[in-house]
Image: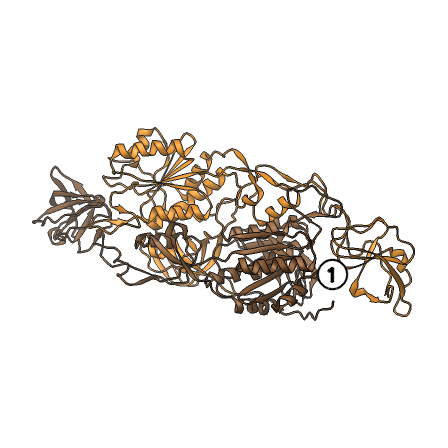
Chain colours: A orange, B brown
Amino acid sequence: MTLNRKPIQVLEAVHRVMEKVRVLPPETVYYLNSGGRVLAEDLTATNDVPVFTKSAMDGFAVRASDTEGASGDCRIEFKVVEEVPAGASSDYILKKNEAFRIMTGAEVPKSADTVVMFEQSKETEEGFTVRKTFTKGENIAFQGEECLKGDVIVPEGTLINPGVTATLATFGYEYVKVYKKPVVGVLSTGSELLDAGDTLERGKIRNSNTPMVLAQLGRMNIEGRHYHLESDDFNTILKRVREMIEAVDAVITTGGVSVGDYDLLPKIYEALGAEVLFNKVAMRPGSVTTVSAYGDTLLFGLSGNPSACYSGFELFCRPAFLSMMNSRNVYAPFINAVLDENFTKPNPFTRFIRAEVKFTEEGLLVKPSGFNKSNAVTSIAKSNGVIVLPGGTRGFKQGDKVKVMMTDMTSGTDTFRVPDK
Amino acid sequence: MTLNRKPIQVLEAVHRVMEKVRVLPPETVYYLNSGGRVLAEDLTATNDVPVFTKSAMDGFAVRASDTEGASGDCRIEFKVVEEVPAGASSDYILKKNEAFRIMTGAEVPKSADTVVMFEQSKETEEGFTVRKTFTKGENIAFQGEECLKGDVIVPEGTLINPGVTATLATFGYEYVKVYKKPVVGVLSTGSELLDAGDTLERGKIRNSNTPMVLAQLGRMNIEGRHYHLESDDFNTILKRVREMIEAVDAVITTGGVSVGDYDLLPKIYEALGAEVLFNKVAMRPGSVTTVSAYGDTLLFGLSGNPSACYSGFELFCRPAFLSMMNSRNVYAPFINAVLDENFTKPNPFTRFIRAEVKFTEEGLLVKPSGFNKSNAVTSIAKSNGVIVLPGGTRGFKQGDKVKVMMTDMTSGTDTFRVPDK
C-alpha cells in the first residue's frame, strides 16, 4: 500500500493532538491521595489565615503602652500573670505592667497588643524587664493578614503538589474534587517481540518499548494496561484495538507505523474510520509517528524505534494525558544549555537526542548519552533530558548553545517551545 | 531549658546528615515495579545487541557484489525469491541477482550482505531494479554493534528511569535486585494541631505540615506513616518516638524544635541518648532545624514553620532517603536564573524562598511565589522551585542572577551546590 505522507512540523503536530483532547470528568478523592492530580474546583480559604491573631515568637504578650519610656538605663518591669501555650488562649484582661508568657502560634489574648521576644527581655523573680519601647503589633501575626475567608487560594486546574496538599489540609478539604486520570492501553505490534521473561529465539528480540511506555506512564502515576496480541494479522489487531477503545481513554501502539508490508496500523485506522491527525512529522527519529482520533479516543502510533518511541511519548502523549486531567502546564520545559561535544550530523528534520545534562556552577552542560544510533535502547537509560536541534541545521560544535527538553520534571509549562525549522 | 545552639552552614549540615546514612539492604522486585528504585546489581548485557544481524530498513537484502556496475543508464534487475518479515529468517542461499524482500528488524539471511531500501529500487514484475552500486553492510545493523554479551550496560547505583526499564526488558531481567526504600515515620508535635477533617476550634489550626511531608514522601514514592499523639507531654512523645524507631527507617517530626517552653524534642533526643548532629543551621527560614542519629536511625526535627518544613525536607530528608536507597545523584540541581522582582531583605543567613520559575526563550526567570511571610503555606502551592540567596548578602534587584534549587525534578546530581555564605 502507498500512503500520502507529508511531514508536518513538530509544533503543528503537537497542536493537532492538543486540539483533540477532551477533558475527563471530575471525581472526588481523599486529599492525601490527590498528589499529582489536577484541582477540579477552586480551593478557597474556608477561614482567615491566620484564623486568629497569634504570636509569631516565643515571649511575653503585653500592652505596648506599658513599655513607653523604657531604656537601658530605665528598664520597665512586667509581672507574668498567666501562661498561653500554643493551642490555648486567655480571656484575662491585663492590668498595667502585666504580661502573658506566650508561645509561638498561641492566640494573643485580646488585652495584649505586642509580643516581647524572650531575647528582648531579662528575667526577674516575678517576670521580666524590657529596655525599649515597643510599638503595637510587634511579633504578632494578625488574623487574616495572609488571606481572608473566601479568597481563592489555588485555582481550579492547578497540579496538586505538596504545597497544595498542605493548603488542602489547612482549609479542611479532607476530600477534594480532581479531574480523572486517563487509563491508557498499550499494544505492541510486531510478531518478532518476546516478553522480558521469555528466552530468546532466533530472529526475535524482547519487547522493550511496551515496558518503557508503561514506565513513562508509571512516572506520571497513570495506569497503563498492557494488551497482547496472539498474532499480528489485520483482524486480530483490529479486534484488539476496538476492545481497547471501549475500555480505555487513550491507546498507544508501538511499532507498525512505517512503510513496511507488515505495518498494518494505517489500514486499521482506515477500517475504524479514525481521523488521521498526521502520519509524518518533520523530526528524527520518529518521523513515522502517527496520531489518529476516534471520537474522543486518541490513538497514538509511536515508532517501533526505542528512541523515537521515548521522545514520541514525551512530545505527544504526556501533554495530551496531562491535558485530559485538565492541567495547564503540560509541556516539558526547554532550557538553554552548552553542548559539551561536537555533533556533526546534518539535521534535515528537527532532531531529538537523548542526553546527559550536567548542572554546573556556570550553567547546564549537555551531551548525547552514549552510543547514538537511534535504536540504542541502552542510551535512554543514562539520559536525563533530550537535546533538540532545529531542522535545517548542521554541524553543532562543542561550546554551542542548544535547547534541552527537560523530561525529568514533575511540573511543566503552558507553552511548547520546540525549536522547529 | 537553655540550649547551646551554634549555627553551622547548610553545606556542613547536609554533609553531617549524609555521613550518617546507612544504605538499606537489597530486595528483588518485578521489573515493571522497579521505577524510581536504585539498581543493586550491575545490569549486564545477557546477549549481543543487536542479537542478530538485522535489516535497519524495509527493502531488499541482496549480495552487494551483484549491484556492481549499476547506474541510471544501466539498471540491474533482481528477482525476489523469498520474503523475510520481522521475527523470521531464512537459510536460503542467494544466487546471482536474487534478493529477499525484507522488513526492518528482520534477520538478514547469511547469504545477503547489503539491504536496498524500497526508496532506492524500482519495482518490476518479478522483483526490482537498482541504479547504483551498493557496498557491503548498507542499511544493516550488525550483531553486537551496540554492545556485546557481558558488557555492563547500567551500573549498580543507577536510578531506574523508563530507559532503564526498557533495558531490563531487553536483557530479560524480569526480576531485578534493587535497594529497599526507607519507610518513614512522621510525627507532628503541637497540641494546637487539628486534622484536615476536624472543625476549627478556638486557638487551634489544622495541621498542614504532616500532610505536606507525606506528600513530599509520596512524590518520591516512599511510604510515610503518620503517627499521632494523644497528648503533647514528654512521656507520650518519648514513648511514641521509641515505637517509631523500632518500626521505621527514619523519623520526621515537625515543630517542637524551637526555644519555646513546650518544645520538648531536644529533651527527647537527650533521653534517647541520640547524637545531635546539629541543632542550628545558618539558614532562613528553619534555623532551628535539628537532626539527630540514634544508631542507624536518623531523626529529622523539622521546623513547625511550613516553609521551613518544606525546604528542610528537600534539603536534608530527600537526599538522605535517596542515599539510603543507594542512589548517587541525590541532590536537587541548582540552576542559574534571573530575578524577576526586587528582593530587598538582608540575608544574614542563607535564605530559601519558595519561587515561581518561568522558562523563557532566553533562560529562567524567577520570583518569590506570592505572599512571602515564612509561615505562608499558600505560597508553597504556587512554587516550582526555591530561590537560594547566600548568607551575608542584601538587596537583590530585578535582573540579578540568582541560584534556584530545582525541587520538581525526578533526577538529581551528585554534588550539592548550595551558595552558602
* Horizontal relation, residue B82 to residue A47: left or right: left
Residue A348 visible in the picture: no
Q: Position of residue A190 (x, y in %)?
A: 27, 43
Quadrant for residue A64, please give it.
bottom right
Residue A129 position (above or below residue B190): below
Q: Residues within 10 Å of mark 1 (few under 14, many from 20)?
A: some
Q: Secondary structure at mark 1?
A: loop
For the residue pair A91 and A159, the one nearer the viewer reads as A91
Residue B420 position (above or below residue A2): below
Residue A212 position (above or below residue A400): above
Q: Position of residue B257 (x, y in %)?
A: 67, 61
* Amino acid bearing label 1: Gly
Quadrant for residue B154, please give it.
bottom left
Q: Position of residue A45 (x, y in %)?
A: 68, 41
Tell me the quarter of the image containing the C terminus of chain B.
bottom right
Please name the residue that numbered disc 1 is placed on: B260
